[in-house]
Amino acid sequence: MKTPADADEDARWLTDDEQHTWQAYIQTSMLLEDHLDRQLQRDAGMPHVYYGLLVKLSWAPRHRLRMTELAEAAKITRSRLSHAITRLEKNGWVRREDCTSDKRGQNAVLTDEGFEVLKKAAPGHVEAVRAAIFDRLTPEQIRQFGDICRIVADGLQPEGADLPWLR
């Protein structure tokens, strides 16, 4: 059977070990995102991306961030963020405010109701993350996993890259 590697011998194809690792990563990332999304939909009535936005706002001073900063923190496009914030506003969990330092900018602000929803959702979500990842790893594997994730994430964000939050 012919493979793409047969067509272009000069390309840097993945070794067997790299291909197995790549496929394991793809399967893991898809299954993990689905697992966390289903848990949050079931227990809190929101998708994983909305939960992540509420978390980022809860960590921010005065529970507010400029929309551009929130898009960067969440690693999503500004369009996807705007859509998500609109939905969160309809739920009463977030509100938009004009930015006082830049008339063109807006802040997303976590409301008291949104903070309460987050507090109720967090224990179940943390348990789902713990059961899916951290309970399966040794402390050394957890450190290595963090190191690897940071190396890959840093490599995907070089100066001048076409990053989601810039679109």
Image (spheres, rainbow, N blue to C red):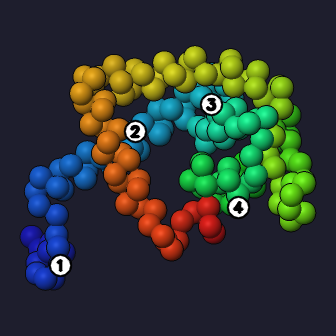
Dot 2 or dot 4: first in sequence order is 2
Of labels 1 and 3, the one closer to you: 1
Amino acid identity at mark 3: Gln
Q: Who's the residue at 77% across and 41% down the image? A: 64
Amino acid identity at mark 1: Ala
* Residue located beneath label 3 in the image: 41
Dot 3 or dot 2: first in sequence order is 2
Q: Does 35 sit above or below residue 130?
A: below
Q: Which mark is residue 77?
A: none
The crowding category of the residue bearing disc 1, from other C-alpha atoms within 10 Å (few below 14, some 14 to 19, many at least 20), is: few
Residue 45, x across and y down, in percent: 69, 29
Amino acid identity at mark 2: Leu
Dot 4 or dot 1: first in sequence order is 1
| Position of residue 108 in the picture relative to residue 21 (left or right) | right
Q: Who's the residue at 62% across and 30% down the image? A: 41
Residue 118, x across and y down, in percent: 69, 25
Dot 1 or dot 3: first in sequence order is 1
C-alpha gap between disc 1 and disc 2:
30 Å
The crowding category of the residue bearing disc 2, from other C-alpha atoms within 10 Å (few below 14, some 14 to 19, many at least 20), is: few
Q: Does 44 sit above or below residue 97?
A: above
Of labels 2 and 4, the one closer to you: 4
Q: Nearer the viewer, residue 154 or 22?
A: 154
* Residue located beneath label 2 in the image: 31
* Residue located beneath label 4 in the image: 79
Q: Nearer the viewer, residue 138 or 33?
A: 138
Amino acid identity at mark 4: Ser
| Position of residue 60 in the picture relative to residue 38 (left or right) | right
Q: Nearer the viewer, residue 123 or 32?
A: 123
C-alpha gap between disc 4 and disc 1:
35 Å
What element does badge 3 sit on? helix
